[in-house]
Image (cartoon, rainbow, N blue to C red):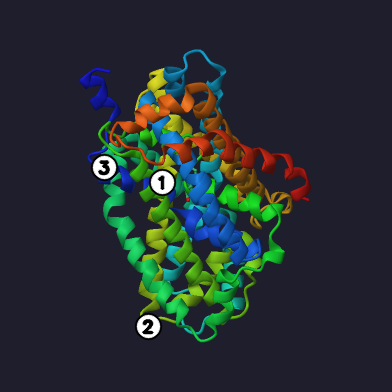
């Protein structure tokens, strides 16, 4: 690739810039909205335990696989695989990822829109005075059933995402993440401390951290694995695409490690906020699902002096965290159309952004606005199919491709650049070739019996 081409594709400004951008993709609604919801619905602490194991053994493996394909291929998922293995059917990994990214973006942006709506609600004083679980329950039900409101905030998210992507990688993504991600972290630590000191917090802590192994079953494992892929942005070519912007001198292993660590830390802390609060202030069930965190966060703000300001700040930062993820989702199809079809960035961004908007409409109307879609639990099913299954299949194919087609030896070659020792190679090799594929295949085989 010529220097000219290199500069057109864009590069991260530095190693830290990549880690921030990748962590920006990983950290989002997955950590703060989806993780506590999955914990609440899957038996609490036992889910947390399986999740941590899944991140360390499987998530890290897939992330390193994606980064090495991306950096070797120097392209979007389809182009990168074509570069490594010309004219092979494995390109399907890229197409599946591109399609999945648009579908995931569609419902994800709806939920991100809820965060914007809650920002406005909190600022306008909807949660002042003594707040109860019954009240936050009612506020959410009314909010999410109002089609115009939901649609309005959903459009805002899609437009900001599309605008940032149309401006390109460096100017767009880097600038957002560097300041705002650390701010989110500080705020979350603060809220976690407050939640832990609420009277009655113990029941929540034990639900969250004391595993009850009688609740362990296949469904818990499936959801924990799916959540690991979702939260780490794996299985759909996002990390692969971001990897293509990493300089050859960077250490892919430590970069992957940092992204996994920071993402898991934020999710873990989100749980520390949600569960003690939930048990200390009655009215909401841990199994509340999609609405859980929107009903619980306003409760904790009512227990803090100056809660209004903290509430506004929280929903603002949550919106930004969600945006750094939507941006990474839109980047996958846009990189494809720019690299492979010679579209301009602007055209690709607006066309794909509009498509995600249209696809998202049924999700937007499925939380009370349209009874038919609500009964179908449209948004919940999108979340299950594209947030769990699609990512699991994508991750499986990525591991098989690296393990048996490109071969670990060649992938390791790419990893040596920037990390000449690569001490984890034997373990990673075992996990890419056997452990991860076998676990995913078993889960997929038994899936019929799990989802009833
Ligand atoms: N990881 C993001 C989150 O946790 C969501 C995401 C999934 C982004 C897959 C890109 C690809 O919110």
Image coordinates for residue 74, horizontal then vertical, percent: 35, 25
Mark number for residue 15? 3
Q: Earlier in the sequence, mark 1 or mark 3?
A: 3
Report crowding for label 1: few under 14, some 14 to 19, many 20 or more residues within 10 A (C-alpha): many
- Mark 1, ligand 1, within 8 Å: the answer is yes
365 sits left or right of 93 in the view: right
Q: Earlier in the sequence, mark 2 or mark 3?
A: 3
Report crowding for label 3: few under 14, some 14 to 19, many 20 or more residues within 10 A (C-alpha): some
Quadrant that contains the N terminus: top left
Q: CA distance from mark 1 to mark 3?
A: 15 Å
Mark number for residue 305? 2
Residue 214 in sight from this viewpoint: yes
Which residue is found at the position 44% from the left and 76% from the top? 301
Report crowding for label 2: few under 14, some 14 to 19, many 20 or more residues within 10 A (C-alpha): few
Which residue is found at the position 47% from the left and 60% from the top? 267
Q: Which residue is mark 1?
A: 25
Image coordinates for residue 7, horizontal then vertical, percent: 23, 26
Q: Earlier in the sequence, mark 2 or mark 1?
A: 1
- Name the residue nearer the viewer: 353 or 259: 259
Quadrant housing residue 215: bottom right
Residue 124's place in the image compared with 352, above or below, is below
Mark number for residue 77? none
Q: CA distance from mark 2 to mark 3?
A: 39 Å
Query: Given the current orientation, which residue lies at the most extreme top position?
Result: 87
SS for callout 3: helix
SS for callout 1: helix
Which residue is found at the position 39% from the left and 30% from the top? 412
SS for callout 2: loop
Image coordinates for residue 389, horizontal then vertical, percent: 63, 41
């Amino acid at each position: 690739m010529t220097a000219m081409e290199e500069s057109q594709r864009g590069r991260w400004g530095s190693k830290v810039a990549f880690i921030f951008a990748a962590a920006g993709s990983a950290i989002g609604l997955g950590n703060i909205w989806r993780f506590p919801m999955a914990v609440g619905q899957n038996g609490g602490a036992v889910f947390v335990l399986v999740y941590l194991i899944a991140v360390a053994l499987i998530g890290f493996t897939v992330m390193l696989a994606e980064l090495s394909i991306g950096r070797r291929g120097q392209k979007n998922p389809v182009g990168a695989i074509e570069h490594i293995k010309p004219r092979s059917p494995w390109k399907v990994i890229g197409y599946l990822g591109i399609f999945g990214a648009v579908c995931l973006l569609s419902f994800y942006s709806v939920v991100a829109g809820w965060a914007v709506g809650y920002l406005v609600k909190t600022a306008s004083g909807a949660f002042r005075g003594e707040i109860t679980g019954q009240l936050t329950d009612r506020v959410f039900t009314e909010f999410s059933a109002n089609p115009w409101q939901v649609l309005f905030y959903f459009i805002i998210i899609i437009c900001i995402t599309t605008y940032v992507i149309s401006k390109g990688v460096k100017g767009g993504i880097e600038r957002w993440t560097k300041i705002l991600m650390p701010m989110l972290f500080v705020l979350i630590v603060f809220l976690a401390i407050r939640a832990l000191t609420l009277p009655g917090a113990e029941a929540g802590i034990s639900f969250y951290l004391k595993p009850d192994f009688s609740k362990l079953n296949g469904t818990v494992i499936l959801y924990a694995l799916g959540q690991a892929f979702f939260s780490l942005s794996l299985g759909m070519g996002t990390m692969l695409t971001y990897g293509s912007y990493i300089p050859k001198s960077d250490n892919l292993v430590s970069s992957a490690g940092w992204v996994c660590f920071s993402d898991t830390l934020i999710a873990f802390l989100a749980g520390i906020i949600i569960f003690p609060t939930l048990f200390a202030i009655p009215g909401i069930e841990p199994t509340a699902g999609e609405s859980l965190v929107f009903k619980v966060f306003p409760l904790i703000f009512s227990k803090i002096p100056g809660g209004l300001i903290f509430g506004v700040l929280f929903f603002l930062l949550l919106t930004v965290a969600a945006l750094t993820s939507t941006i990474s989702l839109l980047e996958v199809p846009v990189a494809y159309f720019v690299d492979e079809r010679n579209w301009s960035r602007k055209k690709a961004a607006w066309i794909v952004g509009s498509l995600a908007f249209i696809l998202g409409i049924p999700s937007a109307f499925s939380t009370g606005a349209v009874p038919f879609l609500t009964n179908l639990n449209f948004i919940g099913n999108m979340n299950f199919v594209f947030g769990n299954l699609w990512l699991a299949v994508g991750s499986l194919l990525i591991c098989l491709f690296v393990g048996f087609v490109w071969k670990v030896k060649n992938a390791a070659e790419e990893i040596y650049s920037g990390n000449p020792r690569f001490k984890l190679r034997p373990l990673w090799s075992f996990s890419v070739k056997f452990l991860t594929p076998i676990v995913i295949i078993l889960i997929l085989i038994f899936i019929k019996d799990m989802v009833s």
